[in-house]
Image (cartoon, coloured by chain):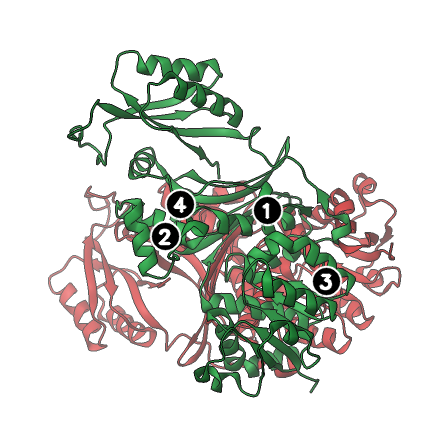
Chain colours: A green, B red
């Protein structure tokens, strides 16, 4: 029997303890596969709690994760602390410099410093694996980096944030208001007390930036990704989308266009018969269009102690099996440089909801602004404001100074630039009571 | 730049030529990833056709695939000829003995000789990769062997044969008869002139045997798998299933039960709201329930020149990256021995369709036989025979000697053994005009 593979595990939260549990539960199975055991020889966490000591066996305690990362008693450093800078970054750098393989679940760290860390890993001849950083238990990193490596990827897209998908599912299936659905997500532990990071789309954008690098062999900076959250999605949008045969999802999309790579996290309308529309609650899904493999879709749990631990363990087993790959699919020295991820050239259909003063000529002015920008309309639906159920007309809300109606427009194929210009002109005309709602329609 | 990775490709049919096309189209991309090019140095096929010579570049021609497999001018042997014995087996063995890595798409060869070939690969320290053998472009082998390796797999299941799924989809969506849908599949090139191998479930069983080995780290003989095809599925079954909220699919399922591993390829009823019910036409899908990763579902093209070539290329790139794993997830010396894949202990709900003589007491006799075996019924639906559309009663077919009605039973949870005994007794009672139709209901 060969020598054990020794791990230093920094971070003993839900993922860290999930990993400890997995390695203990499946020690025999793993040893049979690898021909060697995996042993946790050192651990580090914020506070040293008595109750978990039993589970940790003989692992040595380190107060300082950087000391653990440098300690020669372990050969693989597992970073499960989180945080885009601070101790996580310092410890990962220390481990790589000590020529240790690193496995991390830290998407924020990688979205900000991934390319630099990959360079460091490559120059030290070690692995930097991060399967758990994107879509929890769905092995999308391995899929892009290995299984589909021979393909030119045309598009990668996915429901990458379970919190947002939970909220949107609740709003759709149970006709709940945004604030109400968010509250339930918080009560269930799916959303933080300050939910901005999730509902603002930033968590999904971190993940998308990693997928974009892998899919296109390109160095993509996180802050080049266009991000819109779900905080402005109203019940009126959900209802209008449902009536029109769509479903609203927060989608991360990175795709090749004739103008370069477009990468964005935004709410989108997807056809209700598409496979993505079926993905509800905290489930994640990722789709890849490869030029040879065709269209693949992966669906699974996007978070949670056990699925994330499974992904971390898979990364560790790859290390045990001697697999050391360029973290971002090709050596950092030959990553493509991409420019202009902005959406001005985005092409597609759009959903627009306008709250229009009920005055003569308002609609004429609006449609004129659209046609000025060559935006043609597939459908126009005028609805009373407020939560109107299909086939049921609501009275104007009492106390409303002037009547306004919700007008839903679905455009034919057009460009982002034309849409923005048209909506800016409509705003200036003063015929609407609030900022226009514009949601892209995703063709899947 | 490092030395090229040299390939000997045996078999230049649709998959072989797809691979040649991929390697040529993506030569630059692949070289950037690997730091070395991949070159086809030798080829072999049944007939040497002039028109493809251009595409083959400077590759040397071999009349005999075994000679190609032994030739030192290539270091990886790609077997794309097919056939469970004969030249494919001889060539793969010769290549492994010559300490060459082997990549093959040949499920029949592996289902029959996989364990022996894996042993040969292991003793020679080389890879035996077969991603393309199961589910075309869906990287299910890598998923089980690597991404989910740390999990105890509880169940793996899938729509593994596009031909059957195409036929069942046509029967369901367009209310076509089996023979008619089969004919269209043949015209479209999805089914062979002799379709037995596909529609009898044998192709899916080959694939399932490989998935079973990988999922459970076990040596499973192909002929231990219980196989039923779709040739006895009638329009009456499709219609009854639809009315009851189900969809009929040919499913391969391997799962842990308290009685051991159960592995079977059979038509099953799946709830119409399950993700599998949405998978129509020649698309494949595979689901895995892991104890840590949770439930994962992969959907994608199950066959075709390009998706299969993508899978073969991924196997080749793994070799180029130095990854050599035990072909069946753990060394053959420590594979589990499994016994008793038979279905007697299968537990679940059942759909039964009986064509019952329209005589007094017939139903009483049938329900008595069920209750004798402790099978309780969730629902009983009596229908006129023939293709009856919902809400429309058909006349008895003219010339029918004695009126008979279709009776559909859905059972509560019971065992295969009880069902078989009950149906045998019902047959003996002589109250039905043809053999009972029994289809398992799969809980997904």
Secondary element under disc 2, as helix, strand or loop, is: helix
Tag nearer the camera, 1 or 2: 1
The image's mark for residue A277 is 4
**Mark 1 = which residue?**
A222
Name the chain letter of the residue that bears numbered label 1: A
Please tell me which of labels 4 and 3 falls first in the chain: 3
The circle on residue A47 is none
Marks 1 and 2 on same chain? yes
Q: Which tag is nearer the camera, tag 4 or tag 1?
A: 1
Q: Which chain carries label 2?
A: A
The residue shown at (56%, 57%) is: A107
Of all residues, the one furthest to the left in this rendering is B360
In this view, the residue in front, A87 or A57, is: A87
Residue at which label 2 appears: A166
Q: Which residue is drawn at 73% across and 57% down?
A: A119
Task: Give above or below for B257 relative to B278.
Answer: below
For disc 3, the chain is A
Given the image, what chain letter belongs to the residue carrying mark 4?
A
**On the image, numbered disc 3 is attached to which residue?**
A121
What separation in Å lies between label 4 and label 2 (alpha carbons)? 13 Å
Q: Do labels 1 and 3 share a chain?
A: yes
* Contact check, label 1 and label 3, Cβ < 8 Å: no
The local crowd at label 4, few if under 14, some if 14 to 19, many if 20 or more residues have their Cα within 10 Å, is some
If you read the primary sequence from the N terminus, does the residue marked by circle 4 or circle 1 appear first? 1
Disc number lying in front (4 or 2) = 2
Residues under labels 1 and 2: Cα distance? 24 Å
- Give the quadrant of the C terminus of chain B: bottom left
């Amino acid at each position: 029997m060969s020598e054990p593979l020794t791990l230093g595990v920094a971070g003993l939260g839900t993922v860290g303890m999930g990993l400890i549990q997995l390695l203990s539960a499946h020690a025999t199975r793993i040893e049979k596969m690898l021909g060697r055991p995996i042993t946790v020889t050192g651990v580090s966490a914020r506070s040293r709690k008595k109750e978990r000591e039993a589970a940790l066996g003989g692992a040595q305690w380190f107060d300082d994760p950087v000391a653990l990362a440098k300690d020669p008693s372990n050969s693989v450093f597992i970073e499960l602390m989180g945080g885009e800078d601070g101790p996580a970054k310092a410890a990962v750098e220390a481990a790589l410099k000590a020529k240790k393989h690193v496995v991390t679940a830290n998407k924020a760290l990688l979205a900000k410093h991934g390319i630099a860390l990959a360079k460091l890993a490559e120059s030290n001849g070690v692995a930097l694996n991060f399967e758990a950083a994107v879509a929890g238990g769905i092995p999308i990193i391995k899929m892009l980096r290995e299984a589909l490596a021979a393909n030119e990827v045309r598009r990668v897209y996915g429901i990458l944030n379970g919190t947002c998908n939970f909220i949107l599912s609740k709003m759709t299936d149970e006709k709940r208001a945004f604030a109400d659905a968010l509250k339930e997500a918080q009560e269930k532990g799916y959303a933080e007390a300050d939910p901005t990071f999730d509902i603002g789309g930033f968590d999904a954008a971190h993940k998308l930036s990693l997928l974009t690098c892998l899919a296109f062999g390109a160095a993509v900076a996180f802050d080049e990704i266009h991000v819109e959250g779900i905080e402005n999605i109203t019940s009126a949008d959900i209802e209008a989308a449902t009536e029109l045969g769509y479903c609203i999802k927060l989608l991360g999309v990175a795709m090749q266009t004739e103008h370069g790579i477009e990468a964005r996290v935004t709410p989108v309308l997807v056809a209700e018969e598409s496979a993505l529309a079926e993905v509800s609650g905290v489930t994640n899904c990722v789709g890849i269009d490869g030029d040879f493999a065709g269209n693949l879709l992966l669906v699974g749990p996007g978070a949670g102690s056990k699925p994330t631990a499974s992904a971390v363990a898979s990364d560790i087993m790859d290390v045990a099996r001697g697999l050391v790959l360029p973290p971002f699919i090709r050596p950092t020295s030959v990553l493509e440089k991409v420019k202009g991820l902005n959406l001005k050239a985005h092409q597609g259909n759009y959903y627009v909801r306008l709250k229009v003063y009920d005055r003569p000529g308002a609609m004429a002015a609006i449609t004129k602004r659209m046609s000025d920008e060559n935006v043609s309309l597939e459908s126009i639906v005028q609805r009373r404001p407020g939560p109107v159920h299909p086939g049921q007309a609501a009275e104007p809300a009492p106390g409303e100074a002037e009547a306004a109606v919700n007008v839903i427009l679905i455009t034919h194929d057009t460009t982002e630039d034309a849409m923005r210009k048209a909506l800016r002109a409509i705003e200036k005309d003063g015929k609407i009571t609030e900022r226009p709602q514009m949601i892209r329609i995703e063709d899947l």
